[in-house]
């Protein structure tokens, strides 16, 4: 709650993760709620079970699927044949609308079918990511979670109908290296 109060001057006391998620989703029009949502769910989950896990991943991967579908972008991504192809096409969309610069996301297609992602530039999730790391919030394997690449994994799941995940290989915001892979 301190993060939300400090960054958005809001008090969203909640009795459960579901209650917190509902409140955060409710303020999306007025505030950059994706940051508050990422931070709030990650922190609450960490406090209740000791790490981030299912809820954080569900939010990070589920919300983009719905957004891509709602915006009609699914058609642009539908013909993708591989994980690299989906992420590459999605990155192209982000570049076209001016959300990222081409040089801010470098993709490497690995022989295994996994994709290495080198991030840079202005990461929209960095504030929440850095705050969570500074407070010792990690996933169940002791790693920092990367919302930006979990979004890539969620979109790939929606298009390819397989399960994907992301693992931070080198944490150095905003210049991180992450691997997206099939699980």
Image (cartoon, rainbow, N blue to C red):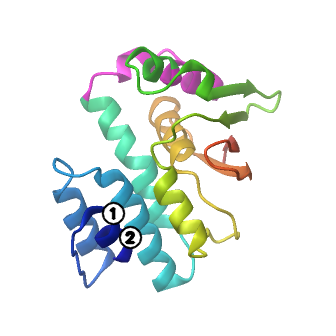
Q: Residue at x 53, y 37 (%)?
A: 152
Asked whether the viewer can see residue 78, the reply is: no
Disc 2 is placed on an element classified as helix
Disc 1 is placed on an element classified as helix
Crowdedness of circle 1 by 10 Å Cα count: few (<14), some, many (20+)? some
Whether 76 is among the magenta residues is yes
Q: Residue at x 71, y 53 (%)?
A: 171
**What is the magenta segment's predominant secondary structure?**
helix
Q: Position of residue 97 (x, y in %)?
A: 37, 18
Q: Position of residue 141 (x, y in %)?
A: 70, 69
Q: Which stretch appears magenta?
A: 71-91
The residue that disc 1 covers is 7
Q: Is residue 145 left or right of residue 1?
A: right
Q: Position of residue 182 (x, y in %)?
A: 66, 42
Whether 33 is among the magenta residues is no
What's the distance in space between the residues labelled 2 and 1, CA to CA?
Answer: 6 Å
Q: Are marks 2 and 1 in contact (CB under 8 Å)?
A: yes
The residue that disc 2 covers is 3
Q: Position of residue 63 (x, y in %)?
A: 35, 46
């Amino acid at each position: 709650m301190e993060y939300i109060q400090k960054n958005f001057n809001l008090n969203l006391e909640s009795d459960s993760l579901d209650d917190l998620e509902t409140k955060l989703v409710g303020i999306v029009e007025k505030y950059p709620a994706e940051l508050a949502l990422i931070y709030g769910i990650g922190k609450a989950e960490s406090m209740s079970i000791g790490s981030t896990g299912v809820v954080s991943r569900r939010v990070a991967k589920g919300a983009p699927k719905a957004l891509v579908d709602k915006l009609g972008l699914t058609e642009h991504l539908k013909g993708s044949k591989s994980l690299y192809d989906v992420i590459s096409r999605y990155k192209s969309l982000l570049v076209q609308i001016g959300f990222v610069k081409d040089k801010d996301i470098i993709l490497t297609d690995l022989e295994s079918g996994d994709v290495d992602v080198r991030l840079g530039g202005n990461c929209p999730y960095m504030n929440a990511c850095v705050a969570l790391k500074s407070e010792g919030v990690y996933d169940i394997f002791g790693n920092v979670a990367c919302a930006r690449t979990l979004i890539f994994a969620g979109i790939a799941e929606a298009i390819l109908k397989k399960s994907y995940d992301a693992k931070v290989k080198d944490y150095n915001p905003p210049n991180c290296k992450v691997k997206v892979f099939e699980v």
